[in-house]
């Protein structure tokens, strides 16, 4: 079973310590664009679920996404991404959201360099309420699937000028 982030929204106080730690201590990592508000992203289920078949990887004809065999984490190469949104369209959980900056997507890489040293992601250690954990968790998809109003996933339309 692959390790993943587990965020308990009931414990989260909305203090943004996890966001500050991610942006300030880890801003220049080549594969990390930073996360604006971890709590906001969680409310909209924008955390990768590490699907076994990884439809987003299979949909990318430019090979900009890669699923690492070691821990099933997705790795994104922004220089190969052309912004076609194929990955966002096929993602069953709507976890790939295109921001305003063309050709870039926000994707938490779980502090890849820290994982290689067997350290936890920075957001885990920075949470004063212990709401964020990293490890192997059993999940019941039927029990843990929640509809968020009428929108589960949304892709913003755009055109290149």
Image (cartoon, rainbow, N blue to C red):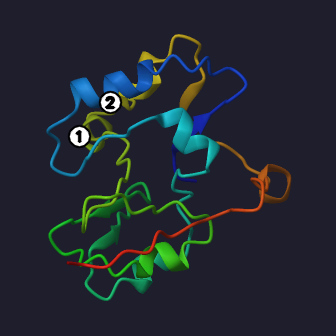
Give the mark, 2 or 1, whose residue is nearer the N terminus.
Answer: 2
- The residue at 50%/70% (across/down) is 155
> Few, some or many C-alpha atoms within 10 Å of disc 2 (few <14, some 14-19, many ≥20)?
many
Q: Which residue is mark 2?
A: 22
Q: Secondary structure at mark 1?
A: helix
Q: As drawn, which residue projects farthest toward the front? A: 161
The percent coordinates of residue 9 (x first, y second) are: 67, 30
- Residue 34 in the image: above or below residue 22: below
The percent coordinates of residue 117 (x first, y second) are: 26, 34
- The residue at 37%/74% (across/down) is 158
The percent coordinates of residue 111 (x first, y second) are: 31, 39
Q: Which residue is mark 1?
A: 113
Foreground of the two, 42 or 149: 149
- The residue at 79%/50% (across/down) is 144
Please state, as top left, top right, bottom left or bottom right, where the C terminus lies in the image.
bottom left
Foreground of the two, 1 or 85: 85
Foreground of the two, 134 or 10: 10
- Residue 62 in the image: above or below residue 64: below
Q: As drawn, which residue projects farthest toward the right? A: 143
How much space separates mark 2 and mark 1, taking CA atoms?
13 Å
């Amino acid at each position: 079973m692959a390790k993943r982030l587990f965020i308990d929204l009931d414990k989260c106080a909305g203090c943004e310590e996890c966001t500050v730690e991610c942006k300030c201590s880890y801003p220049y990592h080549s594969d990390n664009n930073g996360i604006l508000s971890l709590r906001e992203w969680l409310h909209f289920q924008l955390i990768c679920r590490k699907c076994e078949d990884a439809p987003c990887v299979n949909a990318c004809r430019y090979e900009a996404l890669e699923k690492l065999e070691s821990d099933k984490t997705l790795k994104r190469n922004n220089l190969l991404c052309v912004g076609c949104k194929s990955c966002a369209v096929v993602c069953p959980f709507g976890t790939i959201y295109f921001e305003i900056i063309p050709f870039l997507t926000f994707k938490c890489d779980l502090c890849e360099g820290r994982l290689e040293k067997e350290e936890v992601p920075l957001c885990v250690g920075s949470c004063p309420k212990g709401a964020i954990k990293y490890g192997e968790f059993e999940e019941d998809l039927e029990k843990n699937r929640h509809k968020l109003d009428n929108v589960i996933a949304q892709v913003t339309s755009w055109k290149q000028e």
